[in-house]
Amino acid sequence: MSVAPIAQPDAGMRAGILEPLSRLRRRCRAYLALEGMVRFVLALMSACLVQLLIDRALKLDLDQRAAINVVITLFWLWIIHRHLVRPLSRPLADALLAQTVDRANPHLHDRIATAVQFASGAVGSKESNSPQLVRAVIDEACSTAAKVAFVDVLDHRRARQRSAELAGLVAAAVLAFVLLPNLMIPWFQRNWLARDIPWPQQTSIRPEGFDAFDEKRAPRGETLEIFALNLGRVPKSAVLDWRTPDGRGGSETMTLIGASRWVVSLGTLSEDVFFRIHGGDERTGEYHVVVDDRPRVVRTEARVEPPEYAGLDVIEYEQQAVLDLPAGSKLRIDAHLNKPVTTARFAGSGGVALDCEVVAADHIRVVWEQPRAGAYRFELIDANGWENIRPVRFTLKLIPDRAPAVQLELTDVGESITPSTELPLALDFKDEYGLGSAQLFAQRGDDPPLAVPLEGFEAGRREYRTALRYAVRGLGVQPEDRLRLWAEGRDQDPSGPNIGKSDVIELRVLAPIDLRAELAQRELELRQEFERLITSQRGVKDALERLSAELPADAPTRSQAQQLAGLSRRQESITARVLELREGFERILGQMRTSRISRAAEERRIGSQISDPLAKLGEETMPEAQARVSDLRQASDAERVDDANAAQADALREMGRILSGMKEFEGYREVLNLLEEIIGEQSELKKRTIKALEKQVGDILDLDDIDQSLPADRPKP
C-alpha cells in the first residue's frame, strides 16, 4: 500500500540515484529517436526511390504525381508516428529504469529499485516500517549506486550502428543529388515542387498543335491525324496508345516522315481521344484531343418583300435553298447555327460578300436591299478558326418584271382594205404586276404614228381587254397607201418602264374595185379547189361501187374491210377540206362587210347558195356517207350496200348544186366588175374632158398673161 513519502529526497538521493536515472532516461529517449529516424529515413528514401522509378518510367502527369505524393506523405507520417512519436511519448518511470539497472547489476540486490520505491513513499504503513530503516536503505543504495554506471544498461553499440546508418542514408541522399543531378533534380522538381518539366532523355517526342494544357480541338466527323516532332535520337519505332471516354482504345504504330516527324491516322473522329506516345526512352504524358463541331447552318428562314408597285404579298420561305425573287425585292435571310461564330458573311458569285448581323449567339441575319441572281452561301468561322466546309448554298432567281403581253387581233380582215373600212379590233393587255398604260397606234405610210385612246382603261390593272371598230378614214388613207397597226402596253416598273408590243399588222389600202377584183380571184381559187374535191369524191364513189359488187352477202373479207377503211379515211379528209372551203367563203364575205363593199345580193348568194350548203355538206351529208361506208366493214348485206352507194350519190349531187351556185355567182361578179370598170372609166373620161375644155378656154382668153400682169394683192380672175 502506497503512502505519502516519509521525507522529501535529500541531496544524496538526488545525486546518487535520481539524477543518474534522469540521464539514463534522456539517453534512452535519444537512442529511441535515433532508431526511429533511421527507420523513417529508410522508409522515406525507399518510397521516394519507388516514386522516382515509377515517374521516370511512366512520365506521370501532375495529378498522378500529386496522388503518389499524398500516399508517400501518409506513409512517412505513419512511420513517424509508429517509430518516433509513439516510442518517445511512452513514459519511462524511475522505478522501471531502476529495475533495469538492478537487473543489469545483480550484485545490487534490487537496492536501487527499493530506494526509488521508498523515496516515492511506497514504504507500507507507519506501524510496520521504521523511518530509520528506510533512511538506512536509501543511504546504502546511494553509496552502492555511486559505484555503478546507469547508462551501461543501454546498447551503445547498436546506437552507434544506427548513427552510422543514419549518416550513411543522409550521405547517400546527398551523394545521389551530387552524382546524379540530371536524375534527382528533375525528380525533386517534378514530384515535390510540382513543376511540369520533362525528364532528361535521349529521345523526345512532342505532338504538334497542342496547347500548354496538352489539349487540342479537332472537328467532329473528320479524319484525325496526329503529327509529332522527334527531338534527339530517333527510335526504331513509335507507338501511340489511345483511349476514348466510352472505354474504347488501342495502339497504332506511327510512320516516320522525313528524318524527325511522326504521323498516325486514328480514323474518323466522333468523340474525345486521350493518347500517349512511347518510343525509345520516351513516354509522353497524356494528351487530349477535344472533339467539336464545325460551324454550320441548321435552319434557315427567308423573307422576300416585293417592290411596292407590284402589289404582291410578302413571300416567306423556310428550309428552302432556291428562292424566286421578283426584281427589285428586298431579301432577308435568318440562319440558325449549331454554335456561336466569330465571323459570318453571305458570299457568292461575282465577288458579292455581305457581312451578317448577329442577332443572337447562334442566330445571324443578312439583309439585301437589291439582291442579284446567282449562287450564294454563308461563310462561317468559329472561335476555333474553323470554317464551314460544306455550306448550305442558296440559289437566287430573279423574276424580271417582263414587259406586258399585248395581243392585237383583226376579224374579217385580209391583207387589203378600202379607205372606208372600219376595222374590228380586239386588244388584250396583261402584266403580272399591273399596267401603266395601254394604247393603240396606227400609221399611214411613213407618217408619224397616231395614238388611239382606249376607253375604260385604268392604271394598275393586271389585265385589260377591249374591242372596238376603228375607221381608217380618220388617217386620210388613199388607195395604194399602206397602213400599219399595233398596240403597246407599259408597266409601272420605276426602273423601266417595260414596253410590250403586239405584232404589227400591215394592210394595203385598195380602191373598192381593186379589192373586189382581189376577192374575186380568191373566190375563183376556192371554186377550183372545190372542183378538185368533187373529183376526189367521185373517185370515192366509183371505188365503192366497184368494191360493193365484190362484197359477200354476210361480211367483207379482211382485205375488203381494209379497203373500206381506206375509203372511209378518204371521205373524212374530203369532209375536212369542204369545211375549210366554207370558212374561206365566210372570210371573203366578212372582209366585204368590213370594207363596206358588200351588197345584199352578194351576201344572199354567198350565204344561201355557197356557205350554208357547204356547211350542210360538211356537217351532215358527208359524215353520213362516211358512216355508211364504215357500216359495210361490219356487215355487207344488200341493203347496207345500197345505202352506202346512195349516200355517195347524194353527196355528189349536192356538191354539183353548190358548184353551179359558185359559177352563177362568178358570172354575176364578172358583170358587176365590168360595170364598175365602165363607170370608173366614164368618170375618168369626164375629168379629162373638163380639163381639156379649161385648157382651151385659157388659151383663147390668154389667162396666163393676165395673171402675170395683175398686182400681187389683186385676186386673179
Image: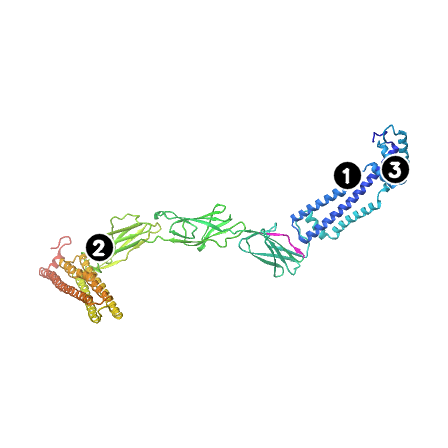
Q: Earlier in the sequence, mark 3 or mark 1?
A: 1
Q: Is residue 432 magenta?
A: no
Which is more foreground, mark 3 or mark 1? Answer: 3
Q: Which residue is identified by label 1?
A: 89
Apparent side of residue 695 relative to residue 25 in the rendered image (left or right)? left
Which is more foreground, mark 3 or mark 2? Answer: 3
Number of labels in the image equals 3
Q: Which residue is identified by label 3?
A: 110
Image quadrant in which the C terminus is located:
bottom left
Apparent side of residue 612 relative to residue 122 in the rendered image (left or right)? left
Give the colour scheme shown: rainbow
Neighbourhood count class around disc 2 (C-alpha, 10 Å): few under 14, some 14–19, many 20 upward: some
Neighbourhood count class around disc 3 (C-alpha, 10 Å): few under 14, some 14–19, many 20 upward: some
Extent of the magenta region: 281-289
Residue placed most toward the observer, 102 or 42: 102
Q: Which mark is residue 424?
A: 2
Residue placed most toward the observer, 121 or 672: 121
Q: What is the x, y in percent for residue 576?
A: 23, 63
Q: Which mark is residue 428?
A: none
Cα–Cα span, label 1 and label 2: 135 Å
* Residue 509 in sight in this render: no
Cα–Cα span, label 3 and label 1: 27 Å
